[in-house]
Image (tube, rainbow, N blue to C red):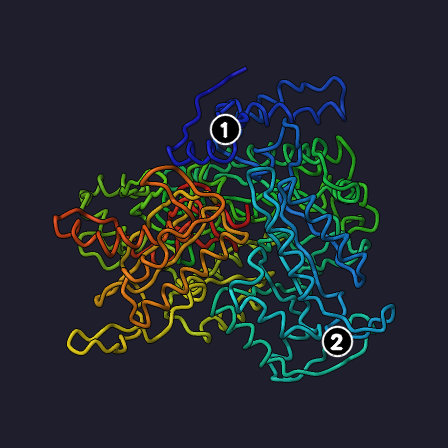
Amino acid sequence: MSNAVIELTPNALRVLQRRYLKKGENGELLETPEEMFRRVAHAIAQAERLYNPAAPVEEWEETFYELMTALEFLPNSPTLMNAGRELGQLSACFVLPVGDSMDSIFEAVKNTALIHKSGGGTGFSFSRVRPKNDLVLSTKGVSSGPLSFMSVFDAATETIKQGGTRRGANMGIMRVDHPDILDFITAKQDDAKLNNFNISVAVTDSFMRAVEHDEEYALVNPRSGEVVKKLNARKVFKTMVTLAWKNGDPGIVFIDRINADNPTPQLGDIESTNPCGEQPLLPYESCNLGSINLSRVAEEGHVDYGRLGRIVKTAVRFLDDVIDVNRYPLPEIEQMTKGNRKIGLGVMGFADLLLRLGVPYDSDEACTIAGELMTFIHQEARAASEELAAERGVFPNFEGSIYDRPDMPRVRNATTTTIAPTGTISIIAGCSSGIEPLFALSYVRANVLDDERMVEVDPYFEQVAKERGFHSPELMARIAEQGTVRGLDEVPVDVQTTFATAHDITPEWHVKLQSAFQSHTDNAVSKTVNFANSATSDDVEKVYLLAYKSGCKGVTIYRDGSREEQVLNVGQSLKKKDPGHGIATTRPSRPRLLTGQTERMETGCGHLFIIMNEDEYGPREVFANMGKAGGCASSNTEALGRLISLALKKGAEPSEVVEHLKGIRCHVPYGIGPNATLSCADAIGKAIERRWVTGAAAAAHGTPEPQLSLVEVAQGACPDCGGVIEHEGGCVVCRLCGFSKCG
């Protein structure tokens, strides 16, 4: 057996060590990356014996090992984490039914806890739950409605840390014709609510026609089937758009289009998706995902389709084997998953591929390449599934499926292709995420894990810059601060055009690329459409309509900085004291970008990251986040930050704030002596003191203070390490430490 050394980047190694490799009781590493891949390959290959006792299991193990260690293909995170280990749960995503009864709802809550504990994410449709104030015959009372029960799911998720490595993520979906739809649309207007949910509205074709013609549509009580009210479709649609513009939620899924591609309609309608929206699933269904690293098939000026075909064929067999060796959290899930045998083979590194081909992301040529690539992958995956069917039999629910016709192939898997977000596995593979453009070509890393700051440059861009003679450390730092090469005179025009980043690309091009992939994908495509902070709600509306008209199955948007601003709830009238009269005068409106410092403090509750920003008038705002979000400690520190910011707004001096915070004790102090932190409040007070009270003297002596880059300020900071958070694929990910909102 080979044990080739893997070409891992320092970042990939860091993420593997933090989140994937086996550890002992004291956190010591018990395996190397090579041993992790060997563990996974060995575990998955055991499925071969189920179909042939004389199968060459060792040969398949070696084939799977080489596929992964060459970084040509990687399965979803739970497979890497859990294959060959006691937990053994290998699926990333599940959908659970939520019926219109207390028994059904709390059974779903219990099952959610079991799934999250095993490392999976969950999707739900709340469309079957009767609306608020509806009659409950058994108690002669009234229903509290689906939104109240969503809060129960959210709280349950908050308490469970999945498998020690992944935090739970949920998708909540409601049909647009549910009587509580307006409450659902505005449910995340307060960003302190439903933090463990992405939410999406299930939009019907009839609703979209009503939007187009400015007509009313009916709201239907799911309990009785009766029409209870009519609303103007265009007004509801604009409400969705406005809320998405404000903070990214809700997304929309085109539910009729999803069900038009439902491969097993005899089993029922699809009502929900996984947390990032790319995997529509029936109740109790799960899906096993994996992604091909397209940067590995990029040759000079062309795609190596021979190599790509070999990767696809092996990856399909790998994912089919995963279904059989998986340990499912519920018997109902095992039955449904093995009945349909859905797999989701997708891609990552698409932006890297385009760069190596010299093709701009925002171009018709890129859309053509996307279509050709996904057509090939889909055809090869379907052919591989046909071969497996001939060898092992069709999926058990084949009869009555869309394939149960003379003109359709006999396949092993009800679906074979999905474009999923690949935040952490793309870090391991050393490539760009999913089908997203590059987030940035150069970063200033404010790494509070190591108290270091350094400029990191995309390797291929750095290579081109050196070959073309325009590389310099100063230019790389400028690019990191600006976030783009466009408009920089030192960079050749053709390089500016080709090396587009997420914020260089107009929202329309994001949708066009999503549509090009969707046309040749069984399931759906997870992608984030990025907007500049200055975008209007009308801009968002155009993208929603374009996504519908161009054949997408859903769309998720994120306007740069929107969620951060809402969380922080920054007002418009921060004040300073007039030095002549001591009277607080109104400051100008908060600028979009502020400079500041992030300090990590150790507390009895864990890492506490304290961000202290100022403008030209002095201290302006304080934000405090626990390293692991959630719970009372996290909410209390967030509340403290808001109150401190309010105090500064009203003219309080930092020294006054420090005086009231320092010395507060709690039952879990950290450390001893003068460097001890007595509580989270005490830690915040000491950080403010160093920054704005005693820190003034240090600054006078020329001691440099680390500041957040423009990209960091715009995007927000990672709750684990304080690094840059990227919004991509309907998810958020930190490429420094591997933190991911959706696992």
Residue 569 shows in this picture: yes
Label 2 – label 1 distance at C-alpha: 51 Å
User: How far from the left and from the top, in percent, is residue 372?
Assistant: 51, 49
Q: What number is the disc on residue 581?
A: none
Name the residue type under label 2.
Answer: Asn
Residues packed near mark 2 inside 10 Å, few (<14), some (14 to 19) or many (20 plus): few
Q: Residue furthest top?
A: 1
Q: 452 or 546, which lies in front?
A: 452
Q: What number is the disc on residue 27?
A: 1
Q: Which sits earlier in the primary sequence, circle 2 or circle 1?
A: 1
Name the residue type under label 1.
Answer: Gly
Q: SS at mark 2?
A: loop
Q: Quadrant of residue 393?
A: top right
Which residue has dot 2 on it?
Answer: 133
Q: Quadrant of residue 42?
A: top right
Query: Residue at the location (42% across, 74% down)?
Result: 536
Q: 619 or 559, which lies in front?
A: 619
Left or right placement of residue 80 versus residue 56 in this view: left
Q: SS at mark 1?
A: loop
User: How far from the left and from the top, in percent, is residue 508?
Assistant: 45, 65
Residue 494 shows in this picture: no
Residues packed near mark 1 inside 10 Å, few (<14), some (14 to 19) or many (20 plus): few
